[in-house]
Amino acid sequence: MQPIAFSLHQHLSVPEEQNSSNHLTARMDAMKSENASTLENAMQLMIQTFHKYSGNEGDKYTLSRVELKEMLTQELGNYLGNAQDKDAVEKVMGDLDSNNDGEVDFTEFIILVGALTVACNDFFLEYHGKDEKNAQKE
């Protein structure tokens, strides 16, 4: 059995002239299988989503402010609500851009998704806890 890093490199590495967001998406689609777990499919979807927006302007491996705003609006609008607000986008960009290069790389993007997922989990646990308390009172 091959190590996962080698396997991923083998599946994702392409010649430079073919290395585009569309080609990466095609490669990720090819990796999907009936045997992939829900979590593996979720990981692939996060990679595809990042690259759907990255590289429309500037570096193809990072999100600019414009790309970040589009991604926040289109993909996380239901959770973030105020993604149209320029100040909110600037705040998210400032919070995520840990290396202060004015762009969000994949690692910084995953931090956003992880933090938002934790916040949603906390909300649902709190909401569920209130439901249980109300049920016990009845």
Image (cartoon, helix red, strand yellow):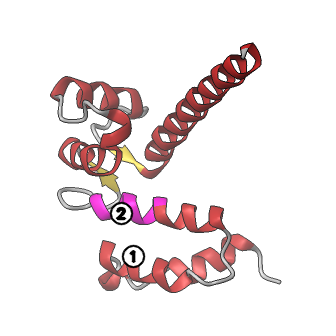
> Relative to the observer, which residue lies in front, 104 or 86?
86
Q: Which dot marks residue 64?
A: none
> Relative to the observer, which residue lies in front, 84 or 69?
84
Quadrant hosting residue 82:
top left
| Residue type at tag 2 | His
Residue designated by label 1: 25
Q: Is the Cβ of the residue at disc 1 closer than 8 Å to that at disc 2? A: yes
For numbered disc 2, what is the local secondary structure? helix
- Look at the image and give the residue range highlighted in magenta: 46-54
| Residue 38 in the image: above or below residue 124 | below
Disc 2 crowd, CA 10 A, few/some/many (<14, 14-19, 20+): many
The quarter in which the C terminus is drawn is top right
User: Percent position (x, y) of residue 51?
Assistant: 35, 63
Q: Which residue is drawn at 28% across and 50% down?
A: 71
Task: From the viewer's perspective, tell me whether residue 28 is left or right of residue 8.
Answer: left
Nearer the N terminus, badge 1 or badge 2? 1
User: Percent position (x, y) of residue 24?
Assistant: 40, 76
Residue designated by label 2: 51
Q: Which residue is drawn at 35% across and 59% down?
A: 61
Q: Which residue is drawn at 23% across and 42% down?
A: 69
User: Percent position (x, y) of residue 81?
Assistant: 29, 33
Task: From the viewer's perspective, tell me whether residue 12 is left or right of residue 52.
Answer: right
| Residue type at tag 1 | Thr
> Relative to the observer, which residue lies in front, 120 or 23?
120
Distance of label 1 from label 2 (alpha carbons) = 8 Å
The quarter in which the N terminus is drawn is bottom right
Task: From the viewer's perspective, tell me whether residue 19 is left or right of residue 66.
Answer: right
User: Percent position (x, y) of residue 123?
Assistant: 56, 27
